[in-house]
Amino acid sequence: MLAHDPGMIRGKSGKKRIDLPKGVIAVTPPSFRRERALIKRGVWPVAGCDEAGRGPLAGPVVAAAVVLDPTRIPKGIDDSKRLTADRREELFEQICATASFSVAFASPARIDRDNILRASLWALKRAVESLPESPKHVFVDGRDRLDTTCNCDAVIGGDGIVVSIAAASIIAKVTRDRLMCALAEECPGYGFESHKGYGVPEHLDALNRLGPSAHHRSFFAPVVAAREKHQPWTVKREADLFDPAGVVPIISAAE
């Protein structure tokens, strides 16, 4: 919530005060409240799941599912985007040492075939199904529930609300970052080790110079443009039915 005059927040008791600069937003860390409510009803295991890598132009989507031990939840778990790379690495090791988890990947080929949303949901479902013990309830980040055999709740902004989802976001993010660093050694010149496949200027410049690699997603617009330049035989142009004066590129992802 926004701080009050002059940036003051009171605790539930009304005694504690945290003075913040005017206009600064206080961010509440994710909690174990929803998981604990299910445990009290006898529902266990409870998993959180999240993915990393929907937006990049290259590399897979990585999905993770995590069942935290209620008695050994590492301190400081938060939405992976709020954490530094070093802190994510620390928490990754702590989560792996104290929780049950699984990871699944949706390759660029699957993304090309199914589209990014369907590929992400497929990977999330696969991560849940790969947990050592099948969960009785799943919380997933986002708007879309998963087609699982147990109950599933979709929580918009869940990686900042539900601590199990936040833990999954850390596992997914660190796993994908490490993978992209490995791909950087296989495909030098693209800068995967720094931008992790996102469409930053450095990456777009490399695409323009080198053309797409085998790890790029064929139907993302900057990759299409690079293929048209470097591999024009893989791009066919056909008339746009909605604009007789225009044409649209038709791409063969298999070539």
Image (spheres, helix red, strand yellow):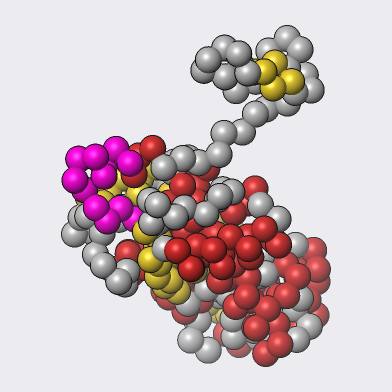
Span of residues in magenta: 36-49
Quadrant in which the N terminus appears: top right
- Residue 208 falls in which quadrant of the image? bottom right
In the rendered image, the residue lying farthest to the top is 5
- Residue at image coords 75%, 86%: 188
Residue 224 x %, y % = 62, 72
Q: How many labels does the image show?
A: 0
From this view, report whether residue 185 is shown above or below residue 68. below
On the question of residue 216 being in view, the answer is no
Q: Where is residue 222 in the image (x, y as percent from the top left)?
A: 67, 67
- Pick whichever, 238 or 40, lies toward us: 40
Task: Identify the residue at image location x=59%, y=49%.
Answer: 76
Looking at the image, residue 221 lies above or below residue 22: below
Left or right placement of residue 185 versus residue 142 in this view: right
71 part of magenta stretch: no
211, above or below 162, in the image? below
The question of residue 41 being in magenta is answered with yes
Q: Nearer the viewer, residue 44 or 129?
A: 44
Toward the viewer: 172 or 184? Answer: 172
Left or right, residue 188 beside residue 110: right
Q: Residue at x 34, y 44 (%)?
A: 35
Residue 33 drawn at (x, y percent)? 38, 37
The image shows residue 166 at horizontal and vertical percentages of 50, 51
Kindly identify the residue that appears in the image at 33 percent across and 41 percent down. 36
Considering depth in this image, is 238 or 186 the residue closer to the camera? 186
